[in-house]
Amino acid sequence: MNRATLLAAACAAAASLSLGSCAVLGAASKAQAVFTGEEDPELAAAALPTFIKASEMLQAADPKDRDKAVTTASLYVMYANAFVYGPASRLPDERFEERKAAADRAGALYRRAFRMLAAALEARAPGALAAAREGDAGPLGRLRAADVPLLYWSAASIMSAFGLNPLDFESAGNLGVAGLLVARAAELEPGWNEGAIQEFYLQYYAGLPAYLGGDRAKALAAYEKALSYSGGRSASLFVAYATSICRPDDDYEGYRAALERALALDPAARPENRLAAELARRDARFLLDTADRYFIIDKGE
């Protein structure tokens, strides 16, 4: 949660569906604040695997505990997104094999996270996932506001894996499930985590083709809601808007303005989310520097 559909159309949409690293870091819990508040991304990247395994040991000792499952699984998603595939996505085309290896590894981590979360969902609402795969959201109605992080991270793990590889049949088979999970989260607490759900919807509706539920109007509405809930303080939101809306529209001016807005935000203004802001600024600078990959730009610009 700054990166995230079937063959031709699917492959074109997949990159938009892979949630950006700064987005998923922005949805972290207070238990992970020691990392989300870190100002040095390299230090966080080096320490996070040890923290993940310690969290997993605690979760394994109490496998029915929902919150421990959410904490551990979300750490896997954050690590895969921010520090496995995120850096690889910026590699040049001639280093395709390295990018692919990183994508494969990140995808495996996303699927591991979802399996952990699926077990927690089954414990909270038996039969809900099986019903969701058939398009029936009814059993998800048993979940309450305290389950919103479980719903969000389950959807994020599915969409992140699918965004990297639309031919991943495990994640593709759960694509509809992700939509139902995040819809239930939005019903329960639409402004959760300063607009994290709405930022998810921005990329979800912008990235999918219309026949799979994509909807530009809904994507723009989600952006406005996320902007309101975050108070305009989320750098990742502006990066997501630039890549999900402006780039497909061939709107270079909007693209540049959104990324410059991300760069203008001071990471120190929100110490609890400093790592997300630092990564968003890194992404914004890279996207501005490589804008000629996507736009025809006058030399004067």
Image (cartoon, rainbow, N blue to C red):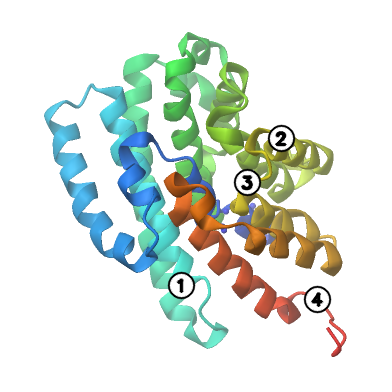
Whole-number angstrom distance, CA of label 4 to CA of label 1: 22 Å
- Residue 233: image tag: 3
In this rendering, the answer to whether 181 lies above or below 36 is above
Which residue lies under the disc numbered 2? Answer: 228
The answer to whether mark 3 and mark 1 are in CB contact below 8 A is no
Q: Nearer the viewer, mark 2 or mark 1?
A: 2
Whole-number angstrom distance, CA of label 2 to CA of label 4: 29 Å
The answer to whether mark 4 and mark 1 are in CB contact below 8 A is no
Relative to 49, 142 lies left or right: right
User: Which quarter of the figure has residue 85?
Assistant: bottom left
The answer to whether mark 2 and mark 1 are in CB contact below 8 A is no
User: Which quarter of the figure has residue 57?
Assistant: top left
Percent of width and height locating residue 217: 84, 39
Q: In what element is the residue under mark 4?
A: loop
Q: In what element is the residue under mark 2?
A: helix
Q: Nearer the viewer, residue 9 or 188?
A: 188
Q: Nearer the viewer, residue 46 or 16?
A: 46
The residue at 35%/43% (across/down) is 33
The answer to whether mark 3 and mark 4 are in CB contact below 8 A is no
Earlier-in-chain disc, 2 versus 1: 1
Amino acid bearing label 2: Ser
In this rendering, the answer to whether 273 lies above or below 94 is above
Which residue lies under the disc numbered 4? Answer: 295
Amino acid bearing label 3: Arg
Percent of width and height locating residue 18: 56, 53
